[in-house]
């Protein structure tokens, strides 16, 4: 007897339907074909124990199982449940004429209970696209899959529940989630709020500009100046995610298995990897490619604390994703692409001792040590960071000030208004949504300067020895400052403020 059960495999952030064909014949043996990995090959032991512990039996016949398409590598333990159901139907232990109308995925424990799987959301999206009636999966993953409207999603806690459903005994009901209601649960009282930060008004202003234009930013200052504290609060002032962005972000976290019984993500992610991270962990990859930290930060913030402590080759692999806003991982037999459109926030000490430029502390690092420390960050990487700002320690008077600072919700209103201006500006330009993404051509079109502004910028570049690469960055940032002021054109004061945010481009900054 031949039975077909349907599962799914995830490659990148997209799913591919897998047909599991179970054939029973005379004799004894268990043959699993179709490029399964070791976790799938071991499934027969888990399935046999789970069936026995639920009053069923593993048939003593010749069982041949093919996972089609047979040339596509299958991986993971999530095929336990569809394999078990195929064996039960194929051996006539249960009747399930409708089983071919459903996608089934889940990892079995020896007692028949189910463990969570990865990639439930992309699998559910594919199941709906291909017209399947429903999707059975572990109850821990049901919220993320139920985001997909028009598909019956059943959360199952053990093998017996799905058997009862197909033989007509159970009362298993599909999980229904109002996606829009989930999405519009806004968090107006974020965990990390700018009202907690005493002083640092100029840095807060700088963060507001970076958030409004989607600009990458680097904070330079001594230990204890508040760099990490400020960086953690950036997501609280970014505009709320759109429904499209929320689905994109949720899909990536679903593939990585990081959702933990959460439905649709409505808060922008904040990722802060340790400086010992490998380049594969940062950009993604591995023998079975998985999304890296830069993809987990998609539509959110990637914070790299103590930037010069990261290995140079790790930082260099970020250059292309920063430019293209996606990362492509190629292997001999397949290629996967993960989106990685994130806002980079980096911090660093200005010298190995950390106290260069701090008048209250002695500078114990020699110019050679400082030059070597700074050279760990390459010019091409700095070229992709629009804003450089020096952070100085907060004096006691401001720390002891009891007055409440402006909160993140108020700042976010201004940022959102500026982003709306940019959305209208770039609505006819493909893949450009905010000022930081502007190409040289768009900069010439939207960053026109009057004579006074041109003269100011020219003088600044000559007197401060600003490098040529600073020119476009200053124009982008000044365009964002103008948007925050709701000004149609860039004027001299916008240019003057933008010039302040290019510390590391000044030649002799270390001298």
Image (tube, grey):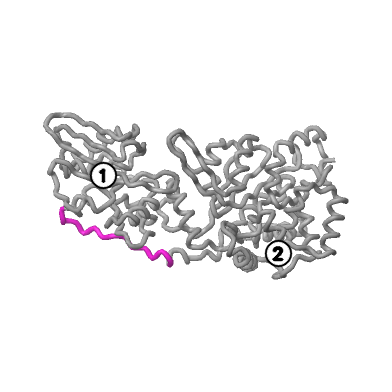
Q: Left or right of 135: which side holds 468?
A: right
Q: Position of residue 96 (x, y in %)?
A: 17, 50
x, y percentage for residue 268? 54, 56
- Element under label 2? loop
Label 1: element kind: helix
For the point 31% across and 44% down, which residue is it?
A: 18
Distance between mark 2 and mark 1 Cα atoms: 61 Å
Q: Is residue 432 left or right of residue 205?
A: left
Q: Residue furthest top?
A: 28
Front residue of 380/186: it is 380
The quadrant the C terminus occupies is: top right
- Report the residue marked by disc 1: 82
| Magenta-colored segment: predominant secondary structure | loop
Compare marks 2 and 1 and give the one earlier in the sequence.
Answer: 1
Residues in magenta?
167-180
Identify the residue at horizontal 57%, vertical 43% (top origin).
273
Report the disc number at residue 402: 2
Residue that appears at 28% across and 52% down? 136
């Amino acid at each position: 007897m031949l039975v077909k059960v349907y599962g799914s495999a995830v490659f990148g952030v997209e799913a591919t339907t897998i047909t599991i064909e179970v054939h029973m014949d005379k004799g004894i043996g268990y043959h699993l074909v179709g490029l399964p990995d070791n976790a799938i090959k071991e499934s027969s032991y888990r399935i046999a124990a789970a069936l026995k512990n639920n009053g069923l039996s593993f048939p003593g016949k010749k069982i041949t199982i093919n996972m089609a398409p047979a040339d596509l590598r299958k991986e993971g333990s999530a095929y336990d449940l569809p394999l078990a159901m195929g064996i039960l139907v194929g051996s006539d232990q249960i009747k399930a004429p409708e089983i071919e109308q459903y996608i089934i995925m889940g990892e079995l424990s020896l007692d028949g209970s189910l463990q969570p799987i990865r990639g439930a959301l992309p699998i559910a999206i594919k199941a709906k696209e291909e017209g399947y009636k429903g999707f059975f999966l572990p109850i821990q993953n049901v919220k993320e899959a139920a985001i997909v409207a028009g598909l019956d999603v059943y959360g199952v806690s053990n093998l017996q529940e799905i058997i009862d459903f197909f033989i007509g005994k159970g009362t298993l009901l599909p999980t229904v989630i109002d996606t829009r209601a989930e999405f519009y649960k806004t968090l107006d009282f974020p965990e990390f709020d700018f009202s907690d930060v005493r002083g640092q008004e100029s840095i807060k202003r700088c963060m507001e500009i970076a958030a409004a234009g989607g600009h990458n930013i680097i904070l330079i200052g001594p230990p204890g100046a508040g760099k990490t504290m400020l960086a953690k609060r950036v997501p609280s002032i970014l505009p709320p995610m759109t429904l499209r962005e929320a689905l994109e972000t949720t899909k990536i976290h679903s593939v990585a298995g990081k959702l933990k019984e959460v439905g649709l993500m409505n808060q922008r992610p904040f990722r802060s990897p340790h400086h010992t991270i490998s380049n594969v962990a940062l950009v993604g990859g591995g023998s079975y490619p998985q999304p890296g930290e830069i993809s987990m930060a998609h539509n959110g913030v990637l914070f790299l604390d103590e930037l010069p402590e990261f290995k140079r080759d790790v930082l260099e692999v970020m250059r292309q994703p920063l430019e293209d806003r996606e990362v492509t991982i190629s292997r001999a037999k397949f290629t996967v692409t993960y989106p990685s459109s994130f806002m980079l926030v980096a911090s660093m000490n200005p010298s190995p001792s950390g106290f260069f430029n701090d008048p209250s502390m002695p500078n114990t690092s020699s110019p050679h040590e400082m030059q070597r420390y700074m050279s760990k960050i390459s010019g091409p990487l700095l070229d992709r960071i629009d804003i450089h700002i020096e952070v100085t320690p907060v004096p006691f008077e401001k720390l002891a000030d009891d007055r409440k600072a402006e909160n993140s919700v108020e700042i976010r209103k201004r940022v959102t208004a500026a982003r709306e201006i940019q959305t209208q500006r770039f609505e006819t330009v493909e893949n450009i949504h905010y000022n930081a993404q502007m190409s040289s051509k768009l900069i010439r079109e939207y960053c026109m300067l009057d004579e006074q502004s041109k003269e100011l910028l020219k003088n600044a570049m000559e007197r401060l020895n600003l490098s040529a690469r600073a020119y476009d960055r200053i124009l982008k940032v000044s365009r964002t400052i103008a948007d925050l002021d709701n000004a149609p054109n860039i004027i001299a004061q916008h240019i003057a403020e933008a010039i302040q945010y290019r510390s590391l481009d000044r030649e002799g900054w270390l001298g």
